[in-house]
Amino acid sequence: MGVCNILIQYLWSLGPGGRGISPRKKLAIVATTAAVAIVIVAVGLASLKPKANPESVNELPEAHFGCNANGLMVAVNASESFDPDGNITNYTWDFGDGAFGSNVTSEHGYAQEGTYTITLNVTDNSGDSNSTSQQVTLTVVVVKSNPIAEIVVISNENGTVVLSGSGSFDPDGGAIETYEWSFGDGSTESGAVVTHVYAVNGTYSVTLTVTDDESATNSTSVDVKVTISKNPQPEQIGPPGLYNAIENHQERVDDKPQLQNSLNHLESNLQRWLEKHGP
């Protein structure tokens, strides 16, 4: 039974026999009561309407990056950055020397050594941003090169060899200060261009060592084949025994210097013989 029906039934039962209130008053009371009931129902329905959710708060993105330096070049990577409740839409790099970059990864070349502060700023899809920074120190390590040694055989005739090292150079732009030669027969010499006389046929390993203006050294070697042609002996004029004695002394005098006086005496005898008996 509705609220209005209850009230009407109640009103009609007032007074003895229901005659205590006139029909017109009863109708006015019923109308007023119905209006109040409608208001009560409307208020009750309004109280049942779901309440709106409170406005959510956007979480800031988190900026993270790695950095790799090689000489004056720096590579940065922000792939570890993220937004807890959305996605990152923009990456901005400040390399600390007036240069800027964008994108998740970037590279930058600095003009000189030093310590620079690199800053990453990230923006999410709600327009909020966050940033982080780190320092990088750049040092250029100059690797010096050794000089290059080069040998050119200018001539090789009858045991006399002329060699040049003047084509040697320093890749760093410096100068070659010294040229040291080893001829493979125990002999050595210095100079950009040298001449050496070999006494015995054979193949010799000739080594050149060069030193530049920063004391860096390098060496190279070449094989030199030496062939000494024997000159034809002139026709001997004079006592054969005297010539044989002279030749024997000449072969031994280098090892036994004491034979030099005897050799001189034999050569003097030959000279006197030639003056007396020669043509």
Image: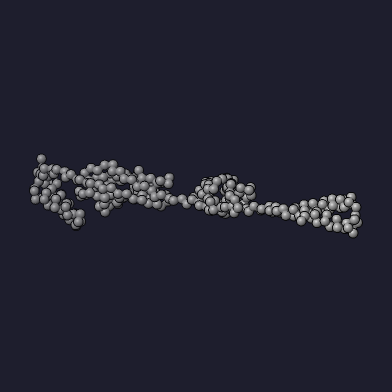
Q: State the count of labels.
A: 0
Residue at the image position 59 percent from the left and 52 percent from the top: 83
> Relative to the observer, which residue lies in front, 153 or 279?
153
Residue at the image position 56 percent from the left and 52 percent from the top: 81
Q: Is residue 50 left or right of residue 120?
A: right
Q: Is residue 240 left or right of residue 24?
A: left
Q: Residue furthest bottom?
A: 16
Residue at the image position 88 percent from the left and 56 percent from the top: 18
x, y (%) of residue 123?
A: 61, 48
Q: Residue furthest top?
A: 279
> Relative to the observer, which residue lies in front, 155 or 169?
169
> Relative to the observer, which residue lies in front, 16 or 170?
16
Q: Is residue 17 above or below residue 200?
A: below
x, y (%) of residue 95?
A: 57, 48
x, y (%) of residue 174?
A: 42, 46
Q: Is residue 129 left or right of residue 28?
A: left
**In the rendered image, which quarter contains the C terminus?**
top left
x, y (%) of residue 111?
A: 53, 46
Q: Residue furthest front?
A: 17
Say if residue 65 shows up in the picture: no
Say if residue 68 shows up in the picture: yes
